[in-house]
Image (cartoon, coloured by chain):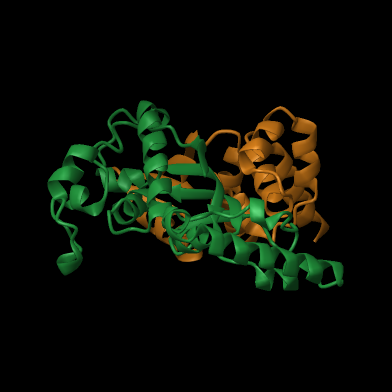
Chain colours: A orange, B green
Amino acid sequence: MKIQLLATTSNIEPLVATAVLTTTSGAQPSILYERMIDRKDKVAEIIERIEVQHGSILEHNRFVWGIIAEEHEVLDVLLKTKFLTFTRIGSKDWLLSGNLRAVIEFWSQQKNENSEALLNSIKHIVPNIFSNITREKNEN
Amino acid sequence: MKIRLLSYTNSKDIISKLPQLEISEAEFLSHCSFTFSIEGISRACSHQLVRHRIASFSQQSQRYIQVKKLDQNVVIPPKITEKAEREFRSSIEDTRNAYDKLITAGVEREDARFILPNATETSLLMTMDGKSLEHFFGLRLCSRAQWEIRSMAEEMLTQVKAVEPELYKGVGPYCIQLGRCPEGRFSCGKIVEMRKRYQ
């Protein structure tokens, strides 16, 4: 399976931090978001505290990939995760998309070449989260 | 109420990398995503909102956030302002006093909140894929939808159309999307007016 990241929503880590703070502080989400965009240190600090089990805060984003894969490879992924969306766009070409939670859960539950490739394709976009979850995985 | 589109997938980013892409609009929409900050709506409205299950929500928690000055943080329906504002405000004032007394008595916020009304203001982040958002507009822009969520949907559509005009061209309530009203005997009968408004 060949994977190419095509697009993502913007400011993913500041939005994760905004989601965390929205649930527990009285401030308005748009104000929190503005504060988080320019505070990389604060975003990293909040992400450090995240418990990945509370996954809904990781859902305010989307990644879109172009995939080249055989049908059986796509079926294998589809059978293992409910929250990734596939569309066939050619005989071996597919459009795939999902949010950070879906990617992380797929990776943590199905450690294989495909889940590693998906996670690796986004690690530069969510470096703090990547570092957080890979540390947790190594500790376990 | 304040609505702000914070983040979205830019369709041009996808299309520019797949220039030969042949895909139906509905399928393409399912790969798009929109995240909104929704502020100052009533809990009555957020209850309706979270019934749209193919979406993600991060809402202010009344377990963690104490409701201060309830009387200044409620949504008052226009019909109540028009017909019975004094009765409404009096009830809210009583509830505020009771809530504050519970907190002062040492009742935890997660229990004290049981007394709070549907009018209590709340704010949240909401993310929907493009297809679910189209469905949301179909239902909640209908003239039969409740006024608060309809007003919210109107503002969301305006902001989505500003960034993705092609994707959401012709999107409106279901009578616009389908070309006929699906409400049967409950139809408002204003399809011509709705067409003028949304097309």
Q: Is residue B4 left or right of residue B156?
A: right
Viewer-proximal residue, B93 or A118?
A: B93
Residue under the point 55% across and 33% down: A10
Residue under the point 50% across and 62% down: B44
Residue under the point 68% across and 67% down: B94
Locate residue B35, reporting x and y percent: 51, 43
For the question of whether residue A92 can be seen, the reply is: no
Viewer-proximal residue, B110 or A69?
A: B110
Quadrant in which residue B170 is drawn: top left
Residue under the point 32% across and 31% down: B165
Locate residue A82, reporting x and y percent: 47, 63
Which quadrant, please, contains the C terminus of chain B? top left
Locate residue A121, reporting x and y percent: 57, 39
Viewer-proximal residue, B169 or B116?
A: B116
Locate residue B1, reporting x and y percent: 52, 44
Q: Is residue B104 left or right of residue A111?
A: right
Q: Is residue A24 left or right of residue B134?
A: right
